[in-house]
Amino acid sequence: MSTTSKSLVVGVDVGGTFTDLFVLDEANGSARIVKVPSTRGEEARGFMNGVARVADSAAAIATIVHGTTVGTNALLERKVARTGIITTRGFRDVLEMRRRDRPETWGLRGSFVPVVPRDLRREVDERVLADGTLHTPVDLEQVRAEARSLLEAGCEAVCVFFINTYANPENERLAVAAVRELWPNPHVTSASEVLPEIREFERCSTATLNAALQPVVGSYLGRLEADLRAQGFAGELLVVQSNGGVMSRQTASDLPVRTALSGPAAGVIACAAIARAAGFPNAITGDMGGTSFDVSLVANGEAALAAQTAIEFGMVIRSPMIQIETIGAGGGSIASVDASGMLQVGPESAGSVPGPACYGRGNMRPTVTDANVLLGRIAADRPLGGGLLAALDAEKSRQAIEEHVARPLGLDVHAAAEAILTVANARMAGAIRLVSIERGHDPRRFAYMPFGGGGALHVCAMMREVGVATGIVPRYPGVTSALGCVIADMRHDAVQTLNRPLAELDVADLQRRIDELSAACQQRLDSSGVRFDEVREVIALDMLYAGQTHTLPVVLADAGRTPITGPSIRAAFEAAYTAAFGRVLDGIPIRVMNLRYARIGVRPKFDLKVLAPQGQGSTTPLGTQRVFHHGQWHEAARHARLELPVAARIEGPAILEQADTTVWLEPGFHAEVDAHGNLLVRLS
């Protein structure tokens, strides 16, 4: 087969409602989008239906990059494999004790059920001290006996977690080797291989969730690859990680815990690239889907990374992730009046099945989408999804809002619908303030970038609520995560605990460890079979003053080019500490807790101008639409958004329609099409 016929790079994001595909043809630089319904519980089927729409044969596709929520959904729904833990005697309850936190800070309510029940958490004799000294060699006969017992109890996966393995992994290494010899499948997780970092709960939680996800994510990706190969696909299947990088299918099967926020992370990566190209290195992203609203912050062109996240209470994953705040405020979020007469929106959602009341699939409780339909912002006869949904039933939206919101509050039905949107917007603005103001960023210095199917309906409201001057609606907001899959670089992160005073740090030993991590990460890059334009590395240390609990990440600038020394580490720490807290603390010793390493294979980039509209286009309105806004009806001009040429300017009130979203331009706002096809929204 000629190389030109294998020029397609496809990004696939499987959401709860739709599976989105972004198709880039590297031969002619063209791009297009494909949207098919998702099949809940059978995500692979929706994926394959989408691939069938991309090309006559999967053989024409060179690379498929997949952002998957299979792991996240499995954890949220507790549909993970039956898993056992083999641990040091006396430490079987680390997973349950956590950090002595609780689901509700006040009161006596709230419970936590660990992923692994107590009877499947087994103890064996072994002990390593905190300084790495071997106190008690591991009893391998006990290890084998407990592994066999867990198999008899129906366990499909097992995690070996010994205490203090960050300081000396030898006992755990021997135990894991013994378990792998007798375990009938590859689902054996070693906590020190997943996370060789101090703090036993975080290491135990991360490794246990990895073990519980291995059969789920591994079988899903294995099935997917087999289906693709059967259709003639001979390229690379890559998977997006929570850190915004991609990894090979095999790495994702080994370390599925790193896919926990895969889909949302891809969206943030795309937004960062689009905003940079549009001249806005600082942007706040808001992904509004059917069930949730995910917010992230991009500063100086880079998405913010967090060291860990909690998928939900007590389910902690310590692995570098793009910092994303999620609230239950999506298009399907249900509005209700509580016992005190207060209007609530979310977190309960109607999802895609049965969906909002206007879908006519049996749900008769009002949602955010119903409010938008009743107020005329979504035209019932031209629904989202490019015809994938039948016409919406605005009368059902009216009935639901009348019964559940208007009557209990004594409001007119349109005022009640506006109240639903006011509450939803206030909740979304709160999430934006959480990632900006509460982290020391002034949102007025950032652009706001809505994506996902519902985000653009609320862009003006978010700008008003938060004080953002510019809104950027990307050309294909509904498939931004799929676009991010195509843009993302390959990235592998590694960590090692050092736990030394800076004054006693052996710099030669530090450099040796960096070289080892570099080689291990490079091996992962090499095994992917992907071509890179360049390979970059990021070296950072988690540091703190003696006596402090929380560490500060300190990036060693140009560490690959200039030698690392004690004074250069101290200078980097003091600069980072001053930037974070405004001063340094004199006379207090500095500790180096962890070494963090990232190796990034930079994939070839395409010019985002391929997304721009071609030719003359048209600014002629398709007609008008009555929209209820701020207590009165407006005649809004309707436009086909993708027909608008570069430099076109549209004044609000206006409705801009496209297959994957609708943009509601409020009175007093205008939008211009930039050279990349984005809509730049500003106050008139």
Image: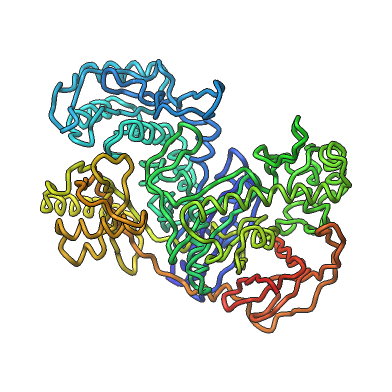
Q: Is residue 169 left or right of residue 396?
A: left
Above/below status of 611 relative to 368? below
Please name whichever residue, 242 or 16, is drawn nearer the observer in this view of the structure. Answer: 242
Q: Is residue 483 visible?
A: no
Percent of width and height locating residue 99:
39, 29
Please tell me which residue lies in front, 553 or 247. Answer: 553
Name the one closer to the observer, 120 or 204: 204
State the residue at coordinates (58%, 62%). 449
Q: Is residue 384 visible?
A: yes
Direction from residue 14 to residue 145 in the image, left or right: left
Extreme front residue here? Answer: 586
Q: Position of residue 514 (x, y in %)?
A: 20, 53
Rendered position, 560 above or below 201: below
Look at the image and tell me in which quarter the C terminus lies: bottom right
Residue drawn where x is 59% and y is 54% of the image: 287
Query: Quadrant where the N terminus lies?
Result: bottom left
Relative image position of residue 55 (x, y in whole percent)? 57, 62
| Image coloring type | rainbow
